[in-house]
């Protein structure tokens, strides 16, 4: 009986000693001069990879948890309808090109006709001028009975005929010029139609390109939100992708501490899964408004209820180096220097910093 009591006393003493040690250790970790801390979870930027147009999924090329690289094809949508529309648009474009070529040919033909018509005008102008002069002489000569009335009438008829032929030749020139203008307008319309058809082809080609869902960044597939064969509307989500090069921990600090945290301040993150491996980080965000804030804050105790959201971002280069090991959702503690002169304790120093200390 006596031995049992002694054993129990020893066990109790050991338990008390262990509890005291853990309490001392926790106090040591939680009361570091010039350094504040808060609990949080490791997070990362999430992107939904979605369809641009309404279409059926042909195949998905990645699985949950798979690491992907920027520019990698993740899924493919069906394109048979778009391919038909593209062929139709290209045919209309070719038709417009043919129409433009035909209009330009008409312009050249009409220009040749215009040259000929202008030559006829010159010829008729010369004949009309001669006929006019002859008629004017006949008018003078008929007054003195120097010529017969028949001769006078003949000269008058020749003059009127020449004048009419000149007017007809000039009208032909104007008509040919109008036909040239019409052909020019037709060519411009065809050229504009070509541009419209090219834009249509480019739009359909862009839709075809968008039927290949591309990874916008390096990351990990978190969820498959749809499966092959499903018909999605425009904007339908197919995959959820995590940007593992943009990982951070969000935690909360009371107002009296958050006000001392500078953007860019040094931080360390200790994950529960890696309690002996501090991860360097920097403060990238401090909320401008408090969370959990009562509407009326009057006393000091109430002011302590003010909690500000703070974000500690991990260096993207470090994340890239260990991207295969980065996992979101892991709980941990973020430590931040509120005094730039403060020194990290040993349990928050990186291996490189510890190595420098031993030299």
Image (cartoon, rainbow, N blue to C red):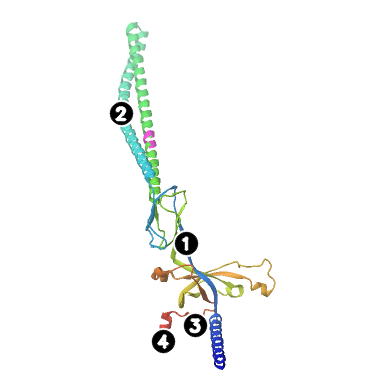
Task: Give the residues in magenta.
Answer: 185-189
Is 52 inside the magenta-drawn segment? no
The alpha-carbon separation of the residues under discs 1 and 4 comes to: 41 Å
Q: Which comes sooner in the sequence, label 2 or label 1?
A: 1
Q: Residue at x 50, y 73 (%)?
A: 332
In this view, 19 is above or below 145: below
> Tag 3, which secondary structure?
loop
Q: Is residue 139 above or below residue 289?
A: above
Q: 338 above or below 61?
A: below
Q: Earlier in the sequence, mark 1 or mark 4?
A: 1
Estimate the x, y position of residue 228 in percent, counting from the top left: 40, 52
Question: Dot 3 corresponds to which residue?
Answer: 345
> Which circle, 1 or 4, is nearer the viewer?
1
Q: CA distance from mark 4 to mark 2?
A: 99 Å
Q: Are marks 1 and 4 in contact (CB under 8 Å)?
A: no
Residue 339 position in % (x across, y down)? 54, 79
Label number found at residue 46: 1
- 55 or 2: nearer the eye? 2
User: Residue at the spot x=67%, y=72% of the render?
Assistant: 302
Q: What residue is shown with label 4?
A: 358
């Amino acid at each position: 009986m006596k031995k049992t009591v002694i054993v129990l006393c020893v066990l109790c003493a050991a338990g008390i000693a262990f509890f005291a040690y853990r309490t001392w250790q926790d106090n040591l970790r939680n009361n570091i001069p010039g350094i504040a801390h808060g609990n949080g979870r490791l997070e990362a930027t999430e992107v939904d990879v979605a369809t641009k147009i309404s279409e059926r999924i042909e195949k998905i090329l990645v699985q949950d948890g798979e690491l992907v690289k920027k520019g990698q094809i993740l899924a493919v949508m069906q394109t048979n309808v778009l391919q038909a529309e593209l062929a139709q648009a290209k045919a209309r474009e070719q038709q417009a090109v043919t129409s433009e070529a035909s209009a330009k040919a008409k312009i050249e033909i009409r220009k040749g006709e215009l040259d000929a018509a202008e030559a006829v005008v010159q010829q008729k102008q010369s004949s009309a001028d001669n006929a006019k002069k002859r008629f004017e002489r006949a008018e003078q000569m008929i007054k003195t009975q120097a010529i017969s009335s028949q001769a006078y009438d003949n000269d008058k008829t020749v003059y009127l005929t020449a004048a009419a032929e000149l007017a007809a030749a000039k009208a032909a020139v104007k008509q040919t010029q109008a036909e040239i203008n019409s052909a020019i307008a037709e060519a411009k319309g065809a050229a504009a139609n070509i541009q419209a058809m090219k834009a249509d082809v480019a739009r359909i080609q862009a839709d075809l390109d968008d039927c290949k869902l591309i990874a916008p960044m390096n990351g990990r597939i978190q969820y498959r939100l749809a499966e092959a064969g499903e018909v999605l509307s425009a904007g339908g989500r197919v995959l959820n992708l995590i940007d593992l090069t943009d990982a951070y921990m969000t935690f909360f600090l009371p107002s009296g501490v958050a006000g001392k945290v500078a953007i860019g301040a040094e931080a360390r993150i200790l994950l529960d899964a890696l309690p002996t491996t501090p991860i360097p980080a920097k403060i990238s965000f401090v909320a401008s408004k408090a969370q959990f804030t009562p509407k009326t804050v009057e006393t000091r105790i109430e002011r302590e209820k003010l909690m500000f959201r703070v974000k500690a971002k991990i260096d993207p280069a470090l994340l890239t180096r260990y991207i295969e090991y980065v996992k979101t959702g892991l709980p941990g503690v973020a430590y931040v220097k509120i005094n730039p002169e403060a020194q990290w304790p040993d349990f928050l120093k990186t291996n490189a910093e510890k190595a420098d200390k031993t030299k």
